[in-house]
């Protein structure tokens, strides 16, 4: 799992049947300081994340296979919407 920022949506004319009703979002992984790193990735969202939201992304494809079936091509999914990030470095 890791934190990511939602940077946009992905629109597909045709989707795998197991992805019907799910939103595909473009996300960027976040470092501890809040800066984006790496290449953008596509994540499956059923929680209603919005552009600019910080989310928790699961990399466990088993989670989606149990929910959507063994044939789903998705692996990354939004499993939480983050309200506040605190580093715990308070004086």
Image (cartoon, grey):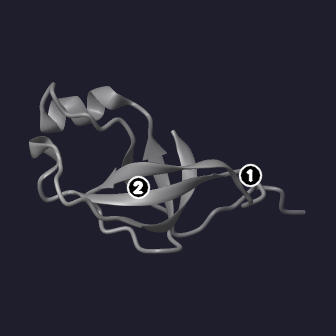
- Image vertical order of residue 6 relative to residue 50, above or below: above
| Image side of residue 34 versus residue 20, left or right | right
- Residue most extreme to the front: 13
- At label 2, counting other C-alpha atoms closer than 10 Å, the crowd grade (few under 14, some 14-19, many 20 or more) is some
The answer to whether the residue labelled 2 contacts the one labelled 1, judged by CB atoms less than 8 Å apart, is no
Q: Residue at x 53, y 73 (%)?
A: 52
Residue placed under numbered mark 2 in the picture: 80
How far across and down, in percent of the image, does residue 53 sit?
Answer: 50, 70
How far across and down, in percent of the image, does residue 82 sit?
Answer: 50, 63
Residue placed under numbered mark 1 in the picture: 32
How far across and down, in percent of the image, does residue 46 sit?
Answer: 25, 58
Q: Residue at x 15, y 27 (%)?
A: 71
| Image side of residue 34 versus residue 49, left or right | right
Query: Disc 2 versus disc 1: distance between alpha carbons?
Result: 17 Å
Question: In what element is the residue under mark 2?
Answer: strand
Quadrant containing the C terminus is bottom right
């Amino acid at each position: 799992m890791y934190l990511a920022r939602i940077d946009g949506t992905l629109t597909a004319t045709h989707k795998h049947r197991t992805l019907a009703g799910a939103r595909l979002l473009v996300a960027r992984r976040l470092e501890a300081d809040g800066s984006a790193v790496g290449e953008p990735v596509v994540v499956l969202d059923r929680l209603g994340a919005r552009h600019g939201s910080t989310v928790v992304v699961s990399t466990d494809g088993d989670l989606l296979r149990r929910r959507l079936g063994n044939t789903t091509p998705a692996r990354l999914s939004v499993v939480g919407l983050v309200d506040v990030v605190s580093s715990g470095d308070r004086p």
